[in-house]
Image: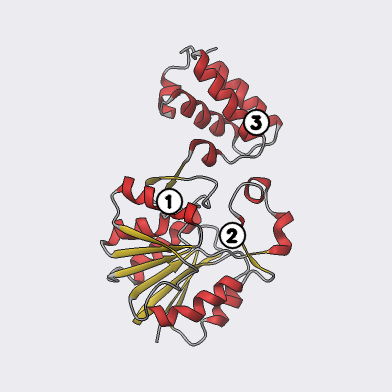
Amino acid sequence: MTVQTALVQGTHLLEEAQIAVPRLTAEVLLGYAMHVERASLFAHPERELSEVEWLHYGRYLHERLSGKPTQYITHRQEFYGREFRVTPDVLIPRPETEHVVEVALRVAARARRILDVGAGSGALAITLALETGAEAWGSELSPAAVAVASANAARLGAPVAFVVCDLMAAFAGGTMGLVVSNPPYVPEAHRADLQREVRDWEPPAALFAGETGFEIYHRIVEDAPRVLAPGGWLILELGFGCLDRVSAMLSGWRDVQVEPDLAGIPRVIAARAG
């Protein structure tokens, strides 16, 4: 079987199963099976697959058809121009979360100590450490997630320390110039509304916040003034429809700013401690 035939057949299977971006998914999975970049598939469509390559490609297609996200199959996800390794122990970093980085670089680029609360793969903490040169920390309730984040930091050369703890409990008062977080914000009642790739594969602790969806926001906003140095910034990613409630939580803060995503949806909120 040639590369071209494998891509045609894989794309057809994915289309029939109504998998998003079927051609791109087939290209990514075939490239991963063959240990080549996608560009090589376009340059050599006539190349014959080895038996091992075909077996791997078939297995990856089967996994994707069962609902497993492509990123958990390839263990890769790009974030802010860097490749992060991901497993089902961590949330897959989304492009929308890059807005948190952009806001941080705009309002708090001089922060010397940064804490990423609920760090997951470490995408925010690692990116901000590399972009700013600041001392960066990440907190995570999951030891398995800390293992993934620590491996990403080592591979990318980012001096980030990850701590297993509940939100900011392990951190002393007045020590951080910037706290960032992409917290869980899905109400438990909305579990059935999520795409199966998210609901069935991504870690529930990174998705679901409780009955209202605002429980983790409330705890972060409540404790952040203790951890932040005077004038320090808190930057949070916003879920859809979360702006009004989170803004109300920050009513006593200074310089509150809201950043929309490319679709115009409020995506990030930033505020300074008093």
Instruction: Report crowding for label 3: few under 14, some 14 to 19, many 20 or more residues within 10 A (C-alpha).
Output: many
Pointer 2 local density, CA inside 10 Å: few below 14, some 14–19, many at least 20: some
Badge 3 or badge 1: first in the primary sequence: 3
Element type at marker 2? helix
**Residue 205 tag number:** 2
Distance, label 2 to label 1, CA atoms, is 16 Å
Q: Say if mark 2 contacts mark 3, CB within 8 Å.
A: no
Q: Residue 248's spot in the image, x, y percent? A: 57, 82
Query: Which residue is disc 3 drawn over?
Result: 14
Q: Nearer the viewer, mark 2 or mark 3?
A: 2
Residue 187 vs residue 108: left or right?
Answer: right
Give the vertical position of 193 relative to 233 (above or below). Answer: above
Q: Name the residue type under label 1.
A: Ala
| Mark positioned earlier in the residue sequence (2 or 1) | 1
Which dot marks residue 147?
Answer: 1
At label 2, the amino acid type is: Ala
- Describe the element under mark 1 as helix, strand or loop: helix
Q: How is the image coloured?
A: secondary structure
| Helix, strand or loop under label 3 | helix
x, y percent for residue 134: 27, 65
Q: Does residue 255 appear in this view?
A: no
- Please tell me which residue is depicted at 39% across the width and 76% down the height of the picture: 233
Q: CA distance from mark 2 to mark 3?
A: 29 Å
Cα separation between marks 3 and 1: 33 Å
